[in-house]
């Protein structure tokens, strides 16, 4: 972000605080909850929400007496992702991966302290397993999260792992030593497989993408039913995911042997 010597506009700062209080964990909130989460007075929150609702940025649910983000953000999301060079450079390879494997294809990036899917292509039939494009998940979620964590700076990773790891399913590994061992393996193998730990019945396979400075920029891969991703099918899918990540990295200018 640019460094500009200028004071921000307080009203806009507060409006952004209200919008950012809506998260994957808290997609719907009452005025009281928003006020508590933002430390903004309820009267001020009400005025902000009134303005945002009038502009289509939030919507009010009369049945639950809660607010949630408005549909206008879908258009903004499409606009942002359409201008991402990474996504544009990767889309052909991601489509090829979709055709090769027949499973849902995802590209995920780290945005601040959360993982965000910037590309998602679901299978037309069968199990729907991938998150919608945009919603934020914790970086410890699934194969894509592990690949992202494996390429975090040490200080950032240690801060993340200082908090308890959420138990997404009964199979989720929460032991820090085991997690760190997995992250080391990802660096060595450049591909990671996770089964039933993020979502029961779902296997994720992810691999890292690098830019022209050989910096990590994204995790790409697939999600599919665990019952199908076994044995030879799993090995073929792993190779396809790894090859896709390497091809995208080369297109981004990375040096891949």
Image (cartoon, rainbow, N blue to C red):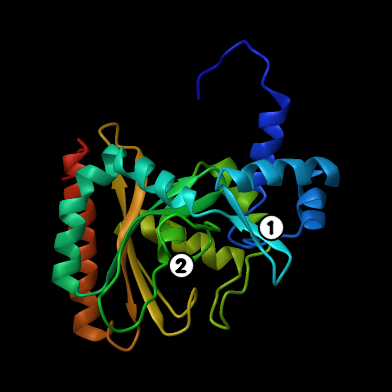
Q: CA distance from mark 1 to mark 2?
A: 17 Å
100 or 184, nearer to the observer: 100
Tell me, for residue 163, which label it has, or none. 1
Q: At 75% across and 41% down in the image, what residue appears?
A: 47
Is residue 172 in view? yes
Q: Is residue 66 above or below residue 250?
A: below
Q: Secondary structure at mark 2?
A: helix
Q: Is residue 228 above or below residue 212?
A: below
Residue lying furthest front? 54
Residue 68 is left or right of residue 134, and the answer is right
Q: Is residue 79 above or below residue 115?
A: above
Pointer 1 local density, CA inside 10 Å: few below 14, some 14–19, many at least 20: few
78 or 107, nearer to the observer: 78
Which of the 4 image quadrants contains residue 190? Answer: bottom left
Q: Secondary structure at mark 1?
A: loop
Q: Earlier in the sequence, mark 1 or mark 2?
A: 2
Determine contact: label 1, label 2, CB under 8 Å.
no
Which mark lies nearer to you, 1 or 2? 2
Relative image position of residue 244 (x, y in whole percent): 19, 57
Tell me, for residue 63, which label it has, or none. none
Relative image position of residue 184 (x, y in whole percent): 43, 57
Tell me the quarter of the image containing the C terminus.
top left
Q: At 63% across and 65% down in the image, what residue appears?
A: 165
Which of the 4 image quadrants contains residue 231? Answer: bottom left
Residue where numbered disc 2 is placed: 142
Q: At 49% across and 73% down in the image, what residue appears?
A: 198
Is residue 191 in view? no
Relative image position of residue 79 (x, y in whole percent): 36, 42
Residue 150 is left or right of residue 31, and the answer is left
């Amino acid at each position: 972000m640019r460094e500009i010597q200028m004071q921000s506009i307080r009203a806009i700062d507060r409006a952004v605080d209200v919008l950012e209080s809506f998260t994957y964990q808290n997609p719907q909130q009452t005025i009281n909850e928003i006020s508590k989460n933002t430390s903004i007075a309820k009267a001020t929150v009400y005025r902000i929400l009134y303005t945002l609702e009038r502009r289509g940025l939030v919507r009010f649910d009369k049945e639950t007496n809660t607010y949630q983000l408005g549909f206008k953000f879908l258009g903004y999301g499409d606009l942002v992702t359409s201008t991402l060079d990474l996504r544009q450079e990767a889309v052909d390879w991601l489509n090829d991966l979709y055709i090769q494997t027949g499973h849902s294809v995802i590209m995920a990036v780290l945005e601040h302290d959360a993982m965000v899917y910037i590309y998602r292509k679901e299978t037309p039939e069968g199990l729907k397993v991938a998150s919608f494009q945009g919603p934020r998940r914790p970086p410890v979620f699934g194969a894509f999260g592990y690949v992202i964590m494996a390429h975090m700076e040490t200080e950032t990773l240690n801060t993340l792992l200082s908090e308890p790891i959420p138990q997404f399913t009964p199979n989720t590994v929460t032991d820090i030593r085991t997690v760190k061992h997995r992250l080391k393996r990802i660096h060595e193998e450049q591909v990671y497989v996770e089964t039933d730990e993020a979502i029961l019945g779902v296997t994720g396979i992810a691999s890292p993408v690098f830019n022209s400075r050989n910096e990590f920029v994204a995790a790409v891969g697939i999600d599919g039913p665990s019952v199908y991703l076994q044995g030879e099918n799993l090995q073929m899918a792993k190779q396809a995911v790894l090859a896709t990540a390497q091809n995208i990295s080369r297109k981004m200018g990375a040096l891949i042997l």
